[in-house]
Image (tube, rainbow, N blue to C red):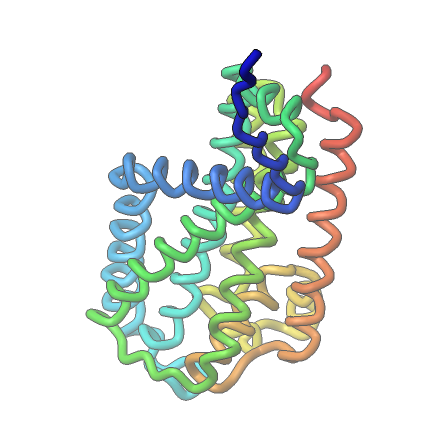
């Protein structure tokens, strides 16, 4: 009786390969979503930045004059770029992950062989991608209004990446706890917006009274904007070493918290 030789079964893919494929799939899906609805994800940030430059830079800036020895438009440009990076990194993840919860397809990822840290990392990187795309777009707009000189490229890249990652992870936490679309908007409206406006985007804290200056140092966005501005102007209201140390610690703490909460099923099994 003749026997037919069957091809040998392919060896199972290693878990590292599975994790990489899962991570890459989440990031590519997020990138595709950002590009597909670019009119909602990128264009509003460009329009907002243009309006800020026209109103604050040209109209108000003429009355304000120089700020810390720099043209006012040049001074606020890094702050405006960072403001859009923060809001878009946060908004991308909170909308995307809450949408996955609302549409009930987040369960497909949770029952897959992907560990939760890969899921968190994938969504966070998706937020970073949108933050960087918006940051580049707003930087191009800024060049029409102000002269930006790169003094410390590494500081610029490190500040924007860490800031985008921090707020992407913050958006993930918001999406975990949110039970409806109203709760998705609570943090951006009542926390992010006030912190951003008081985070040194439009002014130097050296203009503030001593007590207000001390209070301002508690605002984490001040340190992020200060580190980013240092890369362009070579000067900052904050200690650069402290600013980067705070950002690294915040990113690590938020990532660990997000993974721990996802492991517990917070917001998923409720």
Q: Nearer the viewer, residue 191 or 105?
A: 105
Residue at 61% in and 68% down: 223
Q: Position of residue 136 (x, y in %)?
A: 33, 62
Number of marks drawn: 0
Q: In the picture, residue 57 is in which quadrant? A: bottom left
Which residue occupies the extreme top position in the image? Answer: 1
Q: Quadrant of the C terminus?
A: top right
- Residue 123 appears anywhere in the view: no
Q: In the picture, residue 82 is in which quadrant? A: bottom left
Residue 38 relative to residue 266: left or right: left
Q: Position of residue 208 (x, y in %)?
A: 58, 72
Residue 110 relative to residue 87: left or right: right
From this view, report whether residue 95 is shown above or below residue 227. Answer: above
Residue at 57% in and 31% down: 8
From this view, report whether residue 59 is shown above or below residue 154. Answer: above
Q: Nearer the viewer, residue 28 or 154?
A: 28
From this view, report whether residue 107 is shown above or below residue 88. Answer: above
Q: Position of residue 119 (x, y in %)?
A: 61, 37
Q: Nearer the viewer, residue 5 or 119?
A: 5
Residue 33 relative to residue 234: left or right: left
Q: Position of residue 92 (x, y in %)?
A: 46, 40
Q: Quadrant of the N terminus?
A: top right
Which residue occupies the extreme left position in the image? Answer: 144
- Residue 38 appears anywhere in the view: yes
Residue at 29% in and 35% down: 37
Residue at 25% in and 57% down: 50
Q: Nearer the viewer, residue 116 or 101?
A: 116
Residue 60 relative to residue 199: left or right: left
From this view, report whether residue 266 is shown above or below residue 131. Answer: above
């Amino acid at each position: 009786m003749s026997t037919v030789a069957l091809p040998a079964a392919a060896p199972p893919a290693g878990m590292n390969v599975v994790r990489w494929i899962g991570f890459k799939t989440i990031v590519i899906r997020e990138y595709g979503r950002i590009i597909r609805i670019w009119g909602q994800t990128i264009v509003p940030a460009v329009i907002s930045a243009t309006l800020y430059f026209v109103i604050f830079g040209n109209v108000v800036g003429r009355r304000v004059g120089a700020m810390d020895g720099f043209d006012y438009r040049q001074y606020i440009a890094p702050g405006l770029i960072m403001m859009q990076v923060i809001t878009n990194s946060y908004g991308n993840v909170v909308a995307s992950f809450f949408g996955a919860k609302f549409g009930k397809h987040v369960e497909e990822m949770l029952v897959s062989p992907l560990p939760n840290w890969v899921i968190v990392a994938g969504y966070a990187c998706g937020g970073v991608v949108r933050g960087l795309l918006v940051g580049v777009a707003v930087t191009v707009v800024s060049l029409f209004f102000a002269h930006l000189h790169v003094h410390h490229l590494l500081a610029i890249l490190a500040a924007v990446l860490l800031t985008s990652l921090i707020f992407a992870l913050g958006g993930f936490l918001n999406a975990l706890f949110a039970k409806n679309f109203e709760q998705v908007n609570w943090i951006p409206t009542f926390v992010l917006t006030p912190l951003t406006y008081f985070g040194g985007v439009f002014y130097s804290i050296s203009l503030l009274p001593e007590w207000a200056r001390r209070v301002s140092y508690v605002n984490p966005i001040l340190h992020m904007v200060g580190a980013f501005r240092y890369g362009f102007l070579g000067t900052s209201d904050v200690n650069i070493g402290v600013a980067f140390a705070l950002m690294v610690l915040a990113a690590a703490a938020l990532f660990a918290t997000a993974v721990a909460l996802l492991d517990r099923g917070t917001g998923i099994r409720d």
